[in-house]
Amino acid sequence: MGSPAALPEYRLYVLNSHSGHIDRAETFVAGDDIEAISQIQARAGREPLELWRDGRKVRRFDGRPDIFGVRRSQPMEPFLAQLLGREPPQQEATSDPLDQEGTGRGF
């Protein structure tokens, strides 16, 4: 009998949830796509992931939202105000006229 075939190699890309760029990549082996997906589903968290094999995207895993379905990058106040049926808090106006004009130079 011949030697057993090598298991296929997969690449897992961990994406930045804000920019969508790759934060890091990991390589692992699995018997097939179904086994690879099962391995990743067991450890999927808040970060979006992409699973690839031989230049082919097998699956994308969207990051799970934080509590109440709000991602950490979003401010909580507007969401909580909506949940409670209240008006969201208003942004305080800055006293710097340069910043109000949109120059971005106000501190």
Image: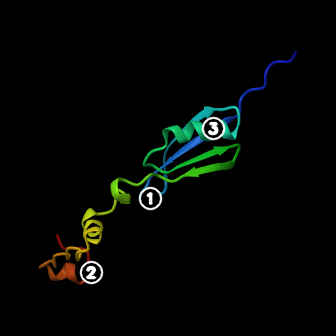
The reply to whether callout 2 and callout 1 are in contact (CB within 8 Å) is no
Q: Which disc, if any, is residue 88?
A: none
Distance between the alpha carbons at the discs numbered 2 and 1: 24 Å
Q: Give the residue number, with chain letter if any, for mark 2.
A: 102
Q: Which badge, 3 or 2, is on the more N-terminal residue?
A: 3
Q: Amino acid at mark 2?
A: Gly
Task: For the C terminus, give its image quadrant.
Answer: bottom left
Q: Earlier in the sequence, mark 3 or mark 1?
A: 1
Q: Which residue is mark 3?
A: 36
Secondary-structure class at tag 2? loop
Q: Is residue 1 left or right of residue 100?
A: right
Q: Position of residue 17 (x, y in %)?
A: 43, 55
Return the residue at label 1: 19
Question: Which residue is pictured at 67% across the width and 40% down the height?
Answer: 34
Name the amino acid type tagged 1.
Ser
Tell me where residue 41 sits by quadrant.
top right
Determine contact: label 3, label 2, CB under 8 Å: no
Seen at 66% across and 50% down, the residue is 57
